[in-house]
Amino acid sequence: MRNKFKIKHGVQKGVIIISAISDIFPVLMQGLGITIQVLIGSIILGYLMAFIAGFCRLSKNPIVRYLTTFYVEVFRGTSLIVQLFWLFYALPILFGIDLGSDYLAGVLAIALNYGAYMSEIVRGSILSVAKGQTEAATALNMSSFQRMRLVIFPQAVRMMLPEFGNYLIQMLKATSLVSLIGMTDILYYGDILRSSNLSQAPTVYFLVLVFYFIMALPLIWLTRKMEGASKKGVASQ
Amino acid sequence: MTEAIVSYQDVHKSFGDTEVLTGIDLDIKPAEKVAVIGPSGSGKTTIIRMLMTLEQPTSGSIIVDGKNLWHMEKNGELVPANEKHLRQVRGDIGMVFQHFNLFPHMTILENCMSAPVHVQKVDKKEAKQLSIEMLEKVGLGDKLDNYPSQLSGGQKQRVAMARALVMRPKVMLFDEVTSALDPELVGEVLEVIRDIAKEGEMAMVLVTHEMEFARDIADRVLFLDDGVIAEEGPPSDVLENPTNERLQSFLHRFRSS
Amino acid sequence: MNNGNWQWDTFFDAFPIVLEGLGITLGLTIATYLFALIFGFIWTLLGAIRVKPLKWLFRWIMEFIRSTPPLVQLFFIFYAWPMVPVVGFALDPFTSAILGLGIHFSTYIGEVYRSGIEAVDKGQWEAARALNFSTGHKWTRIILPQAIPPTIPMLGNYLIIMFKEIPLASTIGVAGILNIANSYGSANFRYLEPLTIVAILFLVLSYPSAILINKLERKMNRRFDKKEPSGSKPTKEKEGAVS
């Protein structure tokens, strides 16, 4: 008798969890689009910022250099979450920019933050290409632009790859913050589900984590690939 | 007498407070082979690096084929050269480095083709043919698609020479090109330099520690000491009957080692 | 929302109020950091397990924690953990933050320990064996004294990184500077000035620390006969934020 009851109880519990998942899953799926949109926007703009700021820090013009250093240090010295709120509230007030959507504030915060970190990688990689490479290119009478484009940059990019890969995953994790400024991403829908039924919270948040992990898997795989690619074809000091 | 292709006029060079070269006067004629010897730190390498525009002279001027290398005329005045001017003048000069400095991300063939295609704007097909020819000449016709990391030191240095030769320079600079090589690989590199020298039309400046080689190949040997050219002349004079005391002891150290 | 430009009145009004949260922010940083330092050690130990399936399992758990958002992990600890049948119990926001953020960063700290141990020259292990040291002595006298110092700058970097991630705890109600700034904002309909104060506080605290750690790193490198970071690969500049 007792045994039978136990089994029945267990089966019931399993059914509850499965039905909970089948309830929760489609709701979370609604947020997937926003999360991916924010991620892609952040990646594109973040890498762009990294290259622009990285090159500007190597500029011969001291004003360009100081301004870029200021940007990099401010964004590396403060928190992403603070930057996100700040941009969200400050952009409309200070610059009269009404973003209309929160998308720009979210992407801008993530891109400016990680762009600042990654600009250090760009700068460091370019500086660590061996000096002999520049000299050989000079001896072949290349212009300074050609030296950068044909010789230095292709080697520096290989050095950047592993770190750039790591930052892909960091940016994915960072996208979860946009739920805090009201964007309807995966975590946003998770929070809605939790507040409507607190007892579901463990399943909800675990599923949210699984969502992020599944998105991270290809990025982890890509990072490994990038690490492999970077091992070839670099002359460093 | 033929006009000099390269002429140093009272060239000085300091690094910080240390004066490395204290007045170099030197004329190199077309097709002349000049070997530069001297103790380490005597500024041998600096001499050719200034000609390649890798180092800027502190004072004095270097004339290449009648054109002032480090200065240009602007409104009738001599002003420091800009990049455009440097590129115009140094186009006639090629250089091979001690540490090869091949581009590791390019194949051997791409290493050779890069400058003709992008700098001289030679047609890609033509550049390729020229590069292959040159690589065959240095004995590496079978390595075209290899990357530098797959080659031995001697092979790398031969590629570096082919890469410089493709540009058809009027003056070729060799900066201790065998110093970084294992002893058994030195021969193959010197052999290629000999072949190049035999063709004759190009002036060559070789900074070297290989005395035998210098004697073989050079029309003139310079002994650099204490920032000046302390002795110069045909190898038979400079290497066999040196007058300078420091040169005597320098050569003595080489013979005994 | 009250529009208009920058208001100095608001700035000076908010400053002392926001500053009151600094103690909590710093306290939470230290507590979380210590937790991560200790918990990181557990990951290092688990990584040393030789049984393949177990090793593989812990490896993936660690990867899972590392590559999912700390914010969600924080919510899991705070909202979901009390609801977990049998083992769950309620936690206050401060403790939740220590656990949530501490566990997340411990996976990074564990890697730092591992890299430190792996960097000890192989000959040192062999020497310890040759001298017939006991396992305890081998670790305390030979390996750890060499493994720990090079990791100190890296660990210092993680202190700064974690300091900057601590305001995530404001989302579950820990009354640090960001939380107070947001409350001030919603009460007065002015977010710009209090948030700027928060940013300034972070900058003022983290920037000098970063410089200090940079100096320490150079000093360490010299002592341990390594190349200056500028010449080595840019991985040295890994002060990456880990949101």
Image (tube, coloured by chain):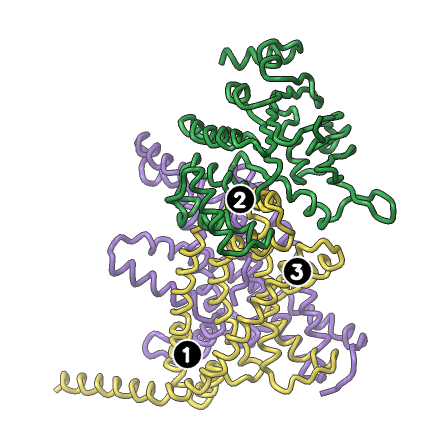
Using a 10 Å C-alpha cutoff, classify the residue at mark 3 as few (fewer than 14 neighbours), some (14 to 19) or many (20 or more): some
Looking at the rendered structure, the number of numbered marks drawn on it comes to 3
Please tell me in which quadrant of the rendered image residue C128 appears: top left
Disc 3 is placed on an element classified as: helix
Q: Is residue A222 left or right of residue B38?
A: left
Mark in front: 3 vs 1: 3
Give residue B167's position: percent from left, percent from top: 57, 44
Give residue C215's position: percent from left, percent from top: 62, 46
| Tag 1 residue | A208
Using a 10 Å C-alpha cutoff, classify the residue at mark 1 as few (fewer than 14 neighbours), some (14 to 19) or many (20 or more): many
Chain identity of mark 3: A
Q: Colour of chain C?
A: purple
**Which residue is at 60% across, 83% downward?**
A102
Q: Is residue C155 in view?
A: no
Are both tags, 2 and 1, on one chain? no
| Tag 3 residue | A73
**Is residue B24 depicted above or below A14 in this figure?**
above
Give residue B230's position: percent from left, percent from top: 69, 17
Q: Residue furthest right?
A: B76
**Which residue is at 44% across, 44% downward?**
B148
Q: Colour of chain A?
A: yellow
Residue type highlighted by circle 1: Val
Are both tags, 2 and 3, on one chain? no
| Tag 2 residue | B166
Q: Report, in whole angstroms, how far the alpha carbon at label 2 lies from the one at label 1.
A: 61 Å
The chain letter corresponding to green is B
**Is residue C92 depicted above or below B1 in this figure?**
below
Q: Residue furthest left?
A: A1
Chain identity of mark 2: B
Q: Is residue C89 in view?
A: yes
Disc 2 is placed on an element classified as: loop
